[in-house]
Image (tube, rainbow, N blue to C red):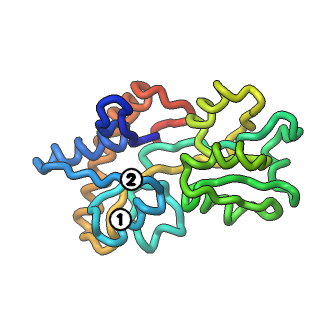
Amino acid sequence: MLAQQDPDNHQLQGISVELAQALADEHSLDLQMQVVQTAKASVAAVANKTADIGFFAIDPARAKDIAFTSAYLHIDACYLVRKDMGITTVQEVDQVDKHIVVGLGSAYDLFLSRHIQKAQLVRAASTQDVVPLFLAEGHAVAAGLQHALSQVLETHPQLHMLSPPFMAIAQAMGCHPGQSNAVKAGLQDFLTAQRQAISQSITQHRLSGVRAA
């Protein structure tokens, strides 16, 4: 959602792409973007030093691999359910007989792995595979970003999105923990200076369930 490929011209676009370009421009550097398909792969890219800087959801499970800035925006994550299942509240999701489909290694996978006590998590290969797996296998619940799930509802009237969101994902920039303090401080200063641009970009891209930090 924050970085995606235009289906027509195949150019990368989104808030993360705009921030990466602005950072490169600030330092008069050529930007080289490494495209990955999952959050887990993005963490691995910086942890393995095949990328210098990345965009991540802040999570304690990633702290050994990534030195995070403070959050620059928050993204609401919600549950998608089938209307005929009779689930009407977030509290009703965590039941012994319920299966929740999540994207493997995503921020909400990590969060729910710590907080779900009774329901079973079913891990799709990526966040893009969550809804197809949820629909194909008849699971009770799918977890995902509010903006993306809202688009699913437009073509699937048999589904319902529960309110309120079950979490707000704190999105940050990050680098390898071994980077110098000057690099880490520089990333934070950059984001602080970009606050107005971030708010404008959220509006420009019409992202629901997303707000600047």
Q: Residue at x 35, y 65 (%)?
A: 45
Residue 108 in view (yes/no):
no
Residue nearer the viewer, 94 or 200: 94
The alpha-carbon separation of the residues under discs 1 and 2 comes to: 11 Å
Q: Residue at x 39, y 25 (%)?
A: 204
Q: Residues within 10 Å of mark 1 (few under 14, many from 20)?
A: many
Kindly identify which residue carries mark 2: 55
Q: Residue 53's spot in the image, x, y percent? A: 30, 58
Q: Residue at x 37, y 28 (%)?
A: 200
The picture quadrant where one finds residue 148 is top right
Q: Residue 148 — which label?
A: none
The type of residue carrying mark 1 is: Ala
Q: Report the side of 127 relative to 113 (left or right).
A: left
The picture quadrant where one finds residue 112 is bottom right
Q: Residue 80's spot in the image, x, y percent? A: 71, 40
Residue nearer the viewer, 109 or 187: 109
Residue furthest to the front: 136
Residue nearer the viewer, 145 or 187: 145
